[in-house]
Image (cartoon, rainbow, N blue to C red):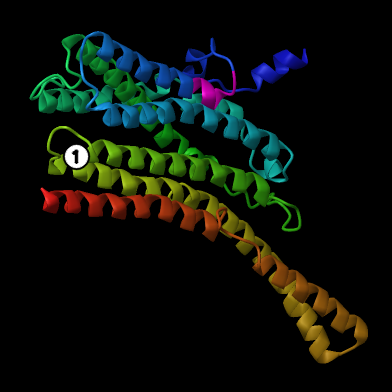
Amino acid sequence: MLLTESMNRSIEPWTGRAVRWLYGPMWLRHFVFWQVGLLGLIVLTRATGGTLDNLIVASAFTMVGFIMTYVPCHVAAHIENLDVKWKRSPLADSIDIDWIVEGRNVLGFKANIRGVLLIIPVIGYFYWWTELFTAPEPWFGSNIANLYWTVLWTMGMLASGWCTSMVLNVLKLPQLLDFDKNSPPSPWEHHMQPLRMMSTIFFTIALYGALIISCIMVVMLYFPIEINIIVVAMAGFCGVIDLFAFVHPQIGVHNVLKQYKDYHMRELAPALDDALAQVTENATIDNLGHFEQLAAMHDRINELEVWPFNVQQLSTLLASVVIPGIVFTFQLFFSGDSS
């Protein structure tokens, strides 16, 4: 009974079901899956007398594939935790949201199939640009190994399209938050924890995005064909989107917190004004004590946080995106000067 109820309150993306036959933590299953794919490329290349000149590129790309297939599972776990914390929070009394249902909607395969369709032109562009990875010769020295690499690369790109669409849907989750002035949560109750968990979802996505950008930079640095401006622009655009993906969705959470704070400040203002007037007219110990209690309440409400993330999260994300970008730009220009 409890097992069935637990399964009914869980979210399992298709990427999780794809590695269900493996054992161990979910991240390890996905890592092993892509490393087996890379190992298959190495074995096939050696067996067919090919070369591994582009092994660094293949390794970086399989890391991208690992991240793209594991992120949905990590996000699903975060949403499940959010649902538990939300139901225990006073926020649930004023904002009734079933995060499990919403999580299944944004993580559903069909809901993100458009991401797969939109990535097809990108795949076609790389096929044309690299001449099916045979320009000027097969990347791995043999047609068989090259064909295997093409299939592995295509599979990773399609998964990337799906994951990108999923992330865009997850970023819309704060739009479900709606301020209800008739039943706002008490400012004395701990309502920041579930909102911080929502912030953690976006922080996690952004960090994975920074890792993907780093992998893309490695691919670009070791790409066997001269990098063109389109690929460089795509990497830079990914960095901007990564920062946007962390901050923008939390503006909705910020607006709700600010509305709650403004509401309680307005509710307290008349009583505080009356208490001040009583102290001015009759400065007794009771009147003064009452005024000081309301003033302390006013100060405490005024100190309520209105952003779910903190400066440390933002600085960590900025460093994870900006520093690799600077290093990549330096190496790209340095390589160009040396050649």
Q: In this view, does 33 lie to the left or right of 49?
A: right
Would you place residue 229 above or below residue 312 in this image? above
Residue drawn where x is 55% and y is 23% of the image: 26
**Main SS of residues in magenta:** helix
Asked if the magenta segment contains residue 29, the reply would be yes
Residue topped by disc 1: 231
Q: In this orientation, does residue 177 appear?
A: no
Q: Which of 231 and 175 is in front in this view?
A: 231
Q: Which of 300 and 42 is in front in this view?
A: 42
Q: Is residue 195 left or right of residue 314?
A: right
Q: What stretch is highlighted in magenta?
A: 24-30
Residue 184 percent coordinates (x, y): 68, 51
Residue 2 quadrant:
top right
Would you place residue 36 above or below residue 93 in this image? above
Residue 5 percent coordinates (x, y): 72, 17
Residue 275 quadrant:
bottom right
Residue drawn where x is 71% and y is 13% of the image: 4
Residue flagged by tag 1: what amino acid is it?
Val
Residue drawn where x is 23% and y is 27% of the image: 54
Q: Is residue 267 left or right of residue 329?
A: right
SS for callout 1? helix
Residue drawn where x is 21% and y is 24% of the image: 123
Residue 296 percent coordinates (x, y): 77, 73
